[in-house]
Image: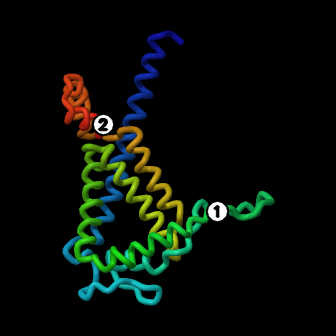
Amino acid sequence: MSASSQTLTSSWETRLAGYGVGIARIVVGLLWFSQLLWKLPPTFGCPSNFQFSTRDVVTSGLCDWIGREAAYAGTLKIFNLDLHLLGGTSFAIDISPLSALYGAFLNGFALPNFGWFSWVIFAMELFITVTVLFGLLTRLGALVGTLQAANLTIGLLPVPGEWEWTYILLTIANFMLFATAAGRYLGVDALLHPRAVERAKTGNKFARLVALLT
């Protein structure tokens, strides 16, 4: 293959990879946006008395899901693999102590302070939505998204009916957006990052920070 052909192939593959990363980022951003719509303030989708769900009572909105997390915390195994068709036994990693600590945090802090803690949850996911969807300071947004997805993994997997790979894949997807600086493809960071890099060369510390976060 000639050098010109290699350059053409490399250029085509680079553009394709960039479009793929950019489209994936937009889809993940839309996912986060969809999760805002059922817990809009000021009620966050909760009933008028802001009652939390328990193992016996199901309410609505954020009160429902944070209540379920608190009610079922304590027993958690991840990466569950059924190996009997391969002649083996089931495999899983038991992180129940972490789940128990999480439950203690919810019951001892989050639920009693739901009045303001609910705003923190909504603001965080709104921040993730804006940064990831528009590719603006995407590395920061995707990092927060990774942490929140990991939080959802720990909180929701003990709840009956939840499929563990949903939250594991959400965590990995956000981490990939962080690792690939996905906002530089079809996002605002494509404009911000080069300018920040140039100013960072002059010793501008703020520009250096922006370059790291885009």
Report x, y in % for residue 201: 23, 23
Sooner in the amino-acid sequence: mark 1 or mark 2: 1
* Label 1: which secondary element: strand
Residue at 25% in and 47% down? 134
Report x, y in % for residue 106: 39, 74
Asked if residue 117 lies left or right of residue 23, the reply is left
Report x, y in % for residue 122: 26, 65
Residue at 32% in and 86% down? 51
- Which residue was labeled with disc 2? 212
Res 113 → quadrant: bottom left
- Which residue was labeled with disc 1? 92
Give the number of marks.
2
Compared with 182, 173 (above or below) is: below
Give neighbour class at mark 2: few <14, some 14-19, many 20+ (Cα, 10 Å): some
Residue 202 marker? none
How far is the residue under mark 1 from the one under mark 2? 36 Å
Please name the amino acid that badge 2 sits on: Leu
Q: Residue furthest right?
A: 87
Residue 186 can be seen in this image: no
Residue 51 can be seen in this image: yes
Please name the amino acid that badge 1 sits on: Ala
